[in-house]
Image: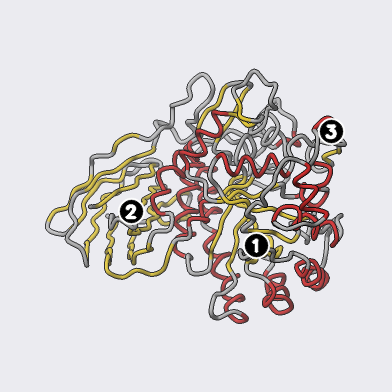
Amino acid sequence: MTNMILNADQPLGTINKNIYGHFAEHLGHCIYGGIYVGEDSPIPNTRGIRHDVIEALRELKVPVLRWPGGCFADEYHWKDGIGPKETRPTMINTHWGGVTENNHFGTHEFMDLCELIDTDPYICGNVGSGTVQEMSEWIEYITFGGRSPMADLRRKNGREEPWRLPFFGVGNESWGCGGHMRPEYYADLYRRYQTYVRQYGTERIYKIACGASDFNYRWTEVLMREAGGLMQGLSLHYYTVPGTWQKKGSATEFGEDEWFTTLQKALVMDELITKHSTIMDIYDPEKRVGLIVDEWGTWYDVMPGTEPGFLRQQNTLRDALVAGLHLNIFHKHCERVQMANLAQMVNVLQAVLLTNEGDLIRTPTYHVLRMFNVHQDAKLLHLGVTSESYVHQGEEIPAVSASASRDHTGAIHISLCNFDPDMDQEITCALRGTEQNTVSGEILTAARINDHNDFDSPDVVAPKTFSGARVVDGVLQLTLPAKSVVVLTIQ
């Protein structure tokens, strides 16, 4: 039995919609073939951007999209990706497969994509191999509305009005692929580069500094101490890897051992956010600086028969549970976590969409993000959870993860995950501070823990109506099926 108490009259903060952000890097077939196929493709498109991708992402209500990387960002020179496509120089993607790219998807195409799916752009600038001038001119090109060399170049390339650029990242993984820097060195570089991310017009750009990987708490300490006053956000990267970096494990061929280990490692995100936030609190007790988890998700061995540098992997019910768990954790930390970006949007790592030529499928992770998007910009409600344990091979984790919010219409949404692959969970939840008692819901589950959607069977893991919840005398009662994700609406 899992017991919960919902205090519907105790809002704890606002769940920033940007927690539901995404990440699209020039990596494998995320951009080329996934999002972008070119204007001459037989695949239906708008200015080269796939219609089926646009439709699916609009349904998902993607709030913010990070681009062009990732490791790719620190070898990307933006001027190579503007102007007539036939005159754009090619480049070698040294990080991901050593392929030669034609630069047909650049600034204009990315901003077009953002407008087509109604999302805010988050651009990551090149600190690793770029210059201050290059970064400064990119900001001018995108955001300046007056007469200037870069604004006039933008007009020459077909865009009269400047774009909105709400978010800008100053480098990526500067401790690793972005330059192998020490935190003190990057902190000084950040102070210098961010100075030239100018604020043209009335809208302020939210500047995001490169933060830590995993457990590198010293990086957070140094960045907050040396540059915290000059940033609005500090990033954090953490991937859920069930094995080792050398042998991560299969995305589809696994048993309960790997299922349990994956969920156990996904839970580490809560610890990381708590500890990095504690350091940030020392220098920023008002929580002015947001923690930006701009790379998260599962990372397995690549799909057999695919290019190792393209990071293409399948996506099972296990990934759906990992996604639900992460979102509930981000909700819990909504005072500090102001954005999170799932890696990655299409065909790479924990993708929400997979494409194969002209075909497209929605993954289990897609369905979870769509089900959970009712929490976007809602008020987090106090939800006390006393969960049974899911025990495997002498180790245990909570069997249930849950969070609750109230949206602008007054409806209450409760998202629930049952990690136990075999045992249903009987749940009672006392509803305090509300008289609402009409319940509806949706469930995502499958027959087996490694069930997934493929191009022959695209709906093996798909949401269905859940009618197993009711409110009796102010108490919500339901049986949460094994290995399932459920979102309830109480009105």
Q: Is residue 142 above or below residue 460?
A: below
Q: Where is residue 295 in the image (x, y as percent from the top left)?
A: 63, 52
Residue 204 picture quarter: bottom right
Q: Whole-Å distance between the Cαs marked 3 and 2?
A: 46 Å
Check disc 2 and report the residue beneath it: 414
Q: Which part of the image, by quadrant, shows the N terminus? A: bottom left
Q: Which residue is drawn at 48% across and 49% down?
A: 393
Query: Between disc 1 and disc 2, whose residue precedes?
Result: 1
Q: Position of residue 343 (x, y in %)?
A: 62, 46
Query: Between disc 3 and disc 2, whose residue precedes?
Result: 3
Mark 3 or 2, which is nearer the eye?
3
Q: Can residue 80 be seen in this view?
A: yes
Q: Whole-Å distance between the Cαs marked 3 and 1?
A: 29 Å
Q: How crowded is mark 1: few (under 14 residues within 10 Å), some or many (20 or more)?
A: many
Check disc 1 and report the residue beneath it: 235
Q: Whole-Å distance between the Cαs marked 1 and 2?
A: 28 Å
Residue 248 picture quarter: top right
Please name the amino acid that badge 2 sits on: Ile
Give me the disc on residue 100. Answer: 3
Q: Which residue lies furthest to the front in this view?
A: 147
Q: Where is residue 231 in the image (x, y as percent from the top left)?
A: 67, 71
Please name the amino acid that badge 3 sits on: Thr
Q: Is mark 3 on a helix, strand or loop?
A: strand
Q: How crowded is mark 2: few (under 14 residues within 10 Å), some or many (20 or more)?
A: many
Q: Residue at x 78, y 60 (%)?
A: 174
